[in-house]
Amino acid sequence: MNDSIPAVILGGTGYVAGELLRLIIQHPQLYLSAAVSESQAGVPIRTVFPNLHDSFGDQTFVPRERLTEHLSGKVAVFSAAPHGASAALVADTIAAGAERSAELAIVDTSADFRYATAPEYEAVYGRPHGAPDLLDRFTCGVPEHLSATPSAYIGHPGCFATAILLAAVPLLTLKLVGPEIYAVGITGSTGSGRKPAPNTHHPLRHANLFAYKPLTHRHAPEVAAVCRSLTDIELVLRFVPHSGPFARGIHMTLQAQLTSPVSETELRQALRDFYADHRFVQVVDGTPHLKDVVGSNYCHLGVAVDGNSLVLLSVIDNLVKGAAGGAMQWMNRQLGFDEYAGLNVLGPAWI
């Protein structure tokens, strides 16, 4: 442990937190110092996440008031708390860390630090931001699109947003398409979180497919804001999300009009060149399959062209690349580790 850095998870009992725990136990340079949960304080981690077996021994979830004990020296802080709750929790953590002269690297997986200003956040979520004074200290984006260390604090984009951004940003950056993009995404039930809800109830979800919040989903303005910051282009995104009859993964279909004639081969090569230095984004021949990425931190992209019409397909695991894995990738950068540390586990494919 002497050469390792302690990790703290805020909001430690949801699906994303469970994935973060799984990634931490595989990480060569991180160890779990504390998983914070008010509702499960004192409960062994293995009780809440039986799939982790005895990976954390008898370690239990700790209440919020004991968090300060774990903030000393350099600390990796992941927030997997819900939207609306994460901001205040992160603010308290930063304040407590400052009192102990701790050096905190923070990655937040909620929506609370994905917008640059409080009015932008409030326009989408309809409530005041929990820590508006911190917004200018956070950077939002996926690791493949930003420099190595843009800031000490990162707001990771949402899972739908990640799948769209990995496809849309190279198209806009290379000026291959105009500013209007249509997107249809299908997500697994884990995207709705651990707490049961009518639309995630198995009898409804099984063997079913349905759209929800068409053209009004909260990830659309988030994607537009990130694209604007990266490309200076005002993206017009027409997004229709769907609930799929599977637990994990996102399949995203983007359609747009090419600005000039490009063959499938040329487009595929342009995307491969764009992501040449980023192992976790791969451009495949043919169409990508969810089973090839679920359980991993990979994104697979596939293309189709007919005249000036473009289709770009993007598949990711919503809990890994779309949340915990992307957050770990960011944390590795923030701490100066190999960006791929703890993330080289491949998906099981036949699930």
Image (cartoon, rainbow, N blue to C red):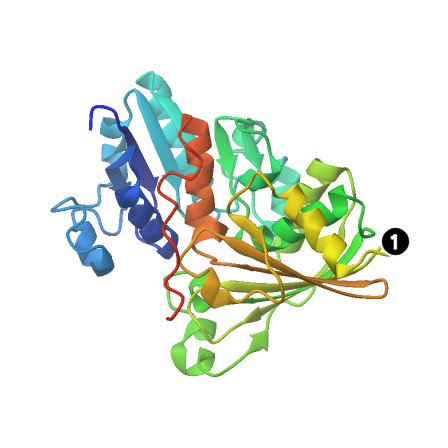
Instruction: Locate residue 277 relative to residue 236 in the image: left or right.
Output: left
Image location (x, y in percent) of residue 324: 41, 48
| Residue 237 in view here | no
Please determine whether, in this image, residue 213 is positioned above or below residue 270: below
Q: Residue furthest right?
A: 260
In the depicted view, which residue is nearer to us: 147 or 63? Answer: 147
Question: Residue 116: where, in percent of width, then height?
Answer: 63, 35
Residue 309's image quarter? bottom right
In the image, is residue 257 above or below residue 33? below
Q: Where's residue 230, x and y in %?
A: 69, 37
Which quadrant does the C terminus fall into?
bottom left
Residue occupying image coordinates x 25% and y 29%: 70
Q: Residue drawn 41% across and 41% down? A: 328
Between 325 and 71, the one nearer to me in the picture: 325
Tell me which residue sits at (35%, 52%) in the image. Answer: 19
Q: Amino acid at mark 1?
A: Ser
Residue closest to the far left: 58
Looking at the rendering, which quadrant does residue 31 occupy?
top left
Can you say whether 232 is above or below 22 in the image? above
Can residue 30 be seen here? yes
- 150 or 239: nearer the eye? 150
Q: Secondary structure at mark 1?
A: loop
Residue wearing tag 1: 260
Other-residue count near label 1 (Cα within 10 Å), few / some / many at <14 / 14–19 / ≥20: few
Relative side of 233 to 116, left or right:
right
Q: Quadrant of the N terminus?
A: top left
Q: Position of residue 301 (x, y in %)?
A: 61, 57
Closer to us: 144 or 236: 144
